[in-house]
Image: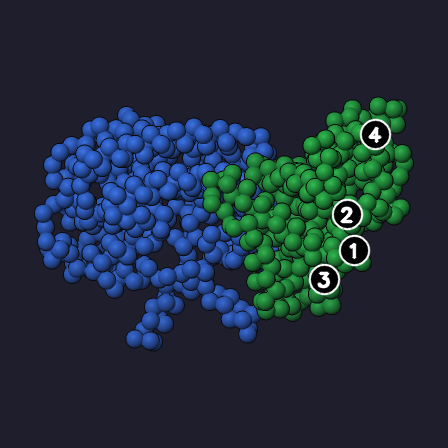
Amino acid sequence: MTLAVMFPGVFVLSLLYSGFDRKLHARMQRRVGPPLIQPFYDFVKLMNKERIIPAAASPSVFVTVTALAAASSMLGASVLMTNLVMEASFVGDIMLVMYLVLMTAALTMIGGSSSGNPYGAIGFSRRVGMLLGYEVPMLISLLIVSYRSGLTLSFYDMVAAQSIADVVLAFSPGAALASLVFALCIPAAAGVVPFDIPEAKTEVAYGYLIEYGGPYLGLLKLAKEVTNFTLSLLFFTLFIYAPQSFPVVSAYNEWVNLLFILVGALAVYMVTITLPRTLFARMKLGQALRFYVWVWALSLVSAGLVMVGY
Amino acid sequence: MSEPKEIEFEYSRLVVPFGPIHPALKEPVHFKVTVRGEEILDVDLVLGHAHRGIELLAQERNILQNLYLTERICGICSHTHTTCYAQAIEEVKGIQIPERAAYLRALIFELERVHSHLLLLGVMAYEIGYDTLFMQIWNMREAVLDLFEEVTGNRVHHSMNVIGGVRWDLTPVMALRVSRVADGVEDAQRRIRTAFMDRTVKKRLVGVGVMSRADARASCLVGPTARASGLTMDVRKDDPYAAYSELKDDYSVVVSDGMDAMARVDVRVRELAESVNIIRAILGRLPPGEIRLKESPMRAVKVPEGEAVSRVEAPRGELIYYLRTDGNEGLRRLKVRTPSQANFAGIRQMMVGGELADVPVILASIDPCMSCTNRLTVVDEGAGRQMNVGLDELRRRRASTS
């Protein structure tokens, strides 16, 4: 029930975060930037546009993946939000969320490759390469958190364990590396510069998104924005959020806490998504993969450190 | 460049159409890039999407009208084209422009080089996904464009040249503004240089699109593209025009031995500084006097029959005009050889063996100006046929319609 209520909430929050992202990005480039609610305008506009399915595409796959991608990403974010609001969760939900995030990426790729456009195919193969790079280190760093929280796979238990132990994982010796790994994976999972290789507009003309337009594009963009929201929320709650460490906040009720989480997640969004895409140039696939070899190594080192008790 | 190739079927081989509409291209051109995975196996080039028939049109109009027509060949180096055209006409007429006019032509020329190079550097930053640098560079470019508006009245098509001189004089107040913008450009040049030395930028540019010195010479490359391959060539030094013979000690020709996209960017960044030097020298030594020959337009179009070849160093390289007047206010033939046309000869050499991600970088590194280059192509979709229309064909069609 709460899950159903969360859907509109997640929708509004993700688009709002994306609006903040665009505004800050513009300000850092000395531009005025769009209004904060521009992503809402964009969504409404795209929803009202003509539906075009290319002749070379396989229509059923091309269309269904857009709705599925949007739904699975929204479900992932809603599970997290529900847990935080209800202060309860079920075993394995963190795996479900990661699965849904991966699912969103996979569905988008499949949609692109079903479009019959060579750029879609290139976008697909590039994304597969990127997935190999970031997906596993990301999971390893989550497992480290799980290990530190007493081997639980339920999201709220992980948050609560930190809360009780009163430890900010991002600053604890063993898990600091894990949080770094997760933070380094966020730009790739969000598909922003320097890791927007699969959809690099000057190279492959938006890659797997190339043939999408109108409502289909609107849904895929929504899926992407919700994924970004999910990732930054995950990072903040798992690595930084421990209410006892922030007495100013924990003195108030759970709604203030929730607001605190959302603001924190926004800050994570800015640092891991907006900043890199403003500061860096796009990498080539080979260069990005070489970078993620180091992230892999880092995640394994971090796992080792945690295992021996740091 | 485009002889049909025997390609044995390979499952992994993919022909990626790059253009005519593509986010990396600002103007229409079509590359057929054959790739295996990310590796480029072959490149074919199809021009002709923006053919405007300017050379033919020039034969219909009189000599004064053609001044404005040639200005519209290119929106970035408009002054370059009119200078080249005006020089050719002046040569046929046998007139010498006043010294002050020659200096003013050179001044606008260098400002145009600054604005063109800033444009390219911004585009380069955009191609490698570095939007912040792109915005910063174009912000500087705006100052130069505004200066153009103040000095000549127009941001893009300056209409500064007339046959026998220039249209507007540079007042002392304007000179002050120009020198202020020159200071700004010098400052920006240092910052841009630092930005392009950044590691993430270098990763995308170093070793990309290599063109050796011998190959560059064999492909007849021109301008910064050739200078980045170690060829010392610059029309301003080799065959001075406007006021460049008097300015030759105030700047040096920038040459690099890097031979890759990084070198081509570096040459342009350093040329910004050289252009600032020239602008300062012009402002310091601007001779007094008339800015154009006093001559009514009715007399200006009276040009005896004759022919002339004129060349200038456009921001992209050597621009050549050949024209033949008909002795009756018109032209019998106008032939324009733009620098991009010469530089396209090197494209295949630079791309093959590289990665697909390098295509926009290599393209931007030669700073192509598509609409300068276009020849007409007719596509017959029903028959699946495509042909380039030559001059004879155009003549035949023209005869049948008129």
The earlier-in-sequence mark between 4 and 1 is: 1
**Distance CA(mark 3)–CA(mark 4):** 41 Å
**Distance CA(mark 2)–CA(mark 3):** 26 Å
Say which chain tag 2 marks.
A
Q: Mark 1 sits on what residue?
A: A2
Q: Residues within 10 Å of mark 2 (few under 14, many from 20)?
A: some
Is disc 1 placed on a helix, strand or loop?
Answer: helix
Is disc 2 placed on a helix, strand or loop?
Answer: helix
**Distance CA(mark 4)–CA(mark 1):** 28 Å
Is disc 4 placed on a helix, strand or loop?
Answer: helix
Determine contact: label 4, label 1, CB under 8 Å. Answer: no
Q: Residues within 10 Å of mark 1 (few under 14, many from 20)?
A: few
Determine contact: label 2, label 4, CB under 8 Å. Answer: no
- Tell me the amino acid under the disc marked 2: Val
Say which chain tag 4 marks.
A
- Tell me the amino acid under the disc marked 3: Ala
Instruction: Give coordinates of residue B86: x percent, y percent.
Output: 22, 48
Relative placement, left or right, of A154 versus A247 is right
- Tell me the amino acid under the disc marked 1: Thr
Relative placement, left or right, of A177 versus A51 is right
Q: Mark 3 sits on what residue?
A: A67
**Distance CA(mark 2)–CA(mark 4):** 21 Å
Residue A165: assigned label: 4
Whether marks 4 and 1 lie on the same chain:
yes
The earlier-in-sequence mark between 3 and 1 is: 1
Colour-to-chain, blue: B
Is disc 3 placed on a helix, strand or loop?
Answer: helix
